[in-house]
Amino acid sequence: MLTAGALRDDGLVQEESAVAQALRDAILERRLGPGSRLPEEQLAEIFASSRGRIRRVLLALAREHIVVIQPSRGAFVASPDAAESRAVLAARRTIEVGVMERPCQPLTDEAIGALRMVIEEERRAHAAHDAVAMIRWSGRFHLELALGLGNAVIADIVSELSLRTSLIIAIYERQNATCCLKADHDLLLGAVSDQAWAEAGRLMSRHLLEIENNLDFSSPAPPATSLGLILKR
């Protein structure tokens, strides 16, 4: 499965990339919450790796803005404040609406099929009330859409912003809200498939604003998560 960060050339060797992806997945799926401490020694033990490799992984994730490294304190999962969160969401609107309005290429039949598969998986997640799967498939839709429209550079940016958005949702989401409205992705795919680019841009803008409207920036951050409980599975 293509996941957030899968497109990124982070300069890590294979073992390090696997650790980085495991941490990205834990953050994306809300198993590893904002503010959670990421001690090198414990991570090295959990992943049967060296502290030097773990340090490289944490530095790579810090460049993606999902980990913060504090001098004399160590590494933590990022916990964006309201101002940073709004900036991330504004960047997503600028980039993803722009992709809809000025695509590099129309969707191929193969890309449309892949997106329909993602939407079907998302429907199953909603039906099962599986919040983790909903977040994963929602992010997958946005990433596959950017890839399908022919801009791998934008897809890489969308990958990072989607992961940062998952952190923001984990902190600020209103109770009983959903990260993406169930019908929105169907409507977006229909407009893009028909090459109705202005309509696709309008729908994407509305869609991302709805995500922001589901957030309460006065909410306190959730408690940090125990690393051992999350990753020793």
Image: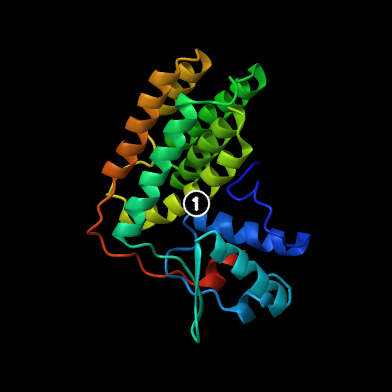
Q: Nearer the viewer, residue 84 or 22?
A: 84
Name the residue at 62% across, 29% down: 150
Q: Nearer the viewer, residue 150 or 43?
A: 150
Would residue 62 be found to the left or right of residue 89 on screen?
right
Would residue 75 be found to the left or right of residue 204 on screen?
right
Q: Is residue 209 above or below residue 172?
A: above
Kind of residue sitting beneath label 1:
Leu
Q: Position of residue 177 (x, y in %)?
A: 31, 43
Q: Position of residue 96 (x, y in %)?
A: 45, 35
Q: Residue furthest top?
A: 194
Q: Is residue 104 above or below residue 2?
A: above
Mark 1 residue element = helix
Q: Residues within 10 Å of mark 1 (few under 14, many from 20)?
A: many
Q: Which residue is mark 1?
A: 163
**Quadrant location of residue 218?**
bottom left
Viewer can see residue 171: yes
Q: Residue furthest bottom?
A: 72
Q: Position of residue 41 (x, y in %)?
A: 63, 81
